[in-house]
Image (tube, grey):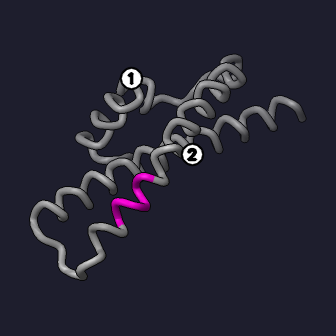
Amino acid sequence: MLPEIDKVIKISDQFHVSTDYLLRENKPEKVSANLDRLVLKFLGSAQDMDAISKELVEVMRDGVIDEKEGKQIDDIIASLDAIEVVIEEIKRSLCHANAEVK
């Protein structure tokens, strides 16, 4: 299943890659270089996870989500969706790398 087009655009902007790159499969000869790049992107995203956790705690502290907090949650979800895309790309690259080794 492919993500909605507006999410693809946000992800491409977030990680400074083309939408074409996000929607096409990587070629096997580029797996190692792509995996290195993906791991670096993931590490950058992982640093944001601590901030995301703290932000969620703040939003949920009073048990009521107002309009501003709803926007914060939407932003958090977009960030988590982007991280999920990177994780999936890493999985695919690892599968391709394992297939090449066999």
Q: Is residue 99 left or right of residue 17?
A: right
| Residue in the foreground of this view, choosing between 3 and 86 | 86
Residue 65, given in percent of the width and then of the height, sits at 18, 73
Amino acid on which the number 1 mark rests in the picture: His
Who is closer to the viewer here, 16 or 58? 58
Q: Amino acid at mark 2?
A: Ile
Residue extent of the magenta highlight: 51-56
Determine whether the residue tagged by mark 2 lies in a helix, strand or loop.
Answer: helix
> Is disc 2 surrounded by few (<14), some (14 to 19) or many (20+) residues within 10 Å?
some
Residue 35 position, x and y percent, is: 66, 29
- Image quadrant occupied by the C terminus: top right
Q: CA distance from mark 2 to mark 1?
A: 16 Å
Image check: 38 left or right of 61? right
Q: Is residue 52 left or right of residue 96?
A: left
Instruction: Give the percent coordinates (x, y) of residue 17.
Output: 41, 23
Label 1, residues with CA under 10 Å away: few <14, some 14-19, many ≥20? few
Quickly name the residue at label 2.
87
Q: Is residue 54 magenta?
A: yes
Are the residues flagged by discs 2 and 1 in contact, CB closer than 8 Å?
no
**Residue 22 sits inside the magenta stretch:** no
* Front position in the image: 38 or 22: 38
- Residue 91: name its quadrant: top right
- Looking at marks 2 and 1 on the same chain, the residue that comes earlier in the sequence is marked by 1
In the image, taking residue 31 as reference, residue 73 lies left or right, namely: left
Which quadrant would residue 22 be assigned to in this image? Answer: top left
Res 16 label:
1
> Which residue corresponds to the image point at 40% horizontal and 51% vertical from the top-left?
81
Our reading of the magenta stretch's main secondary structure is helix
Identify the disc placed on residue 63. Answer: none
Secondary element at image label 1: loop
Q: Residue furthest bottom?
A: 63
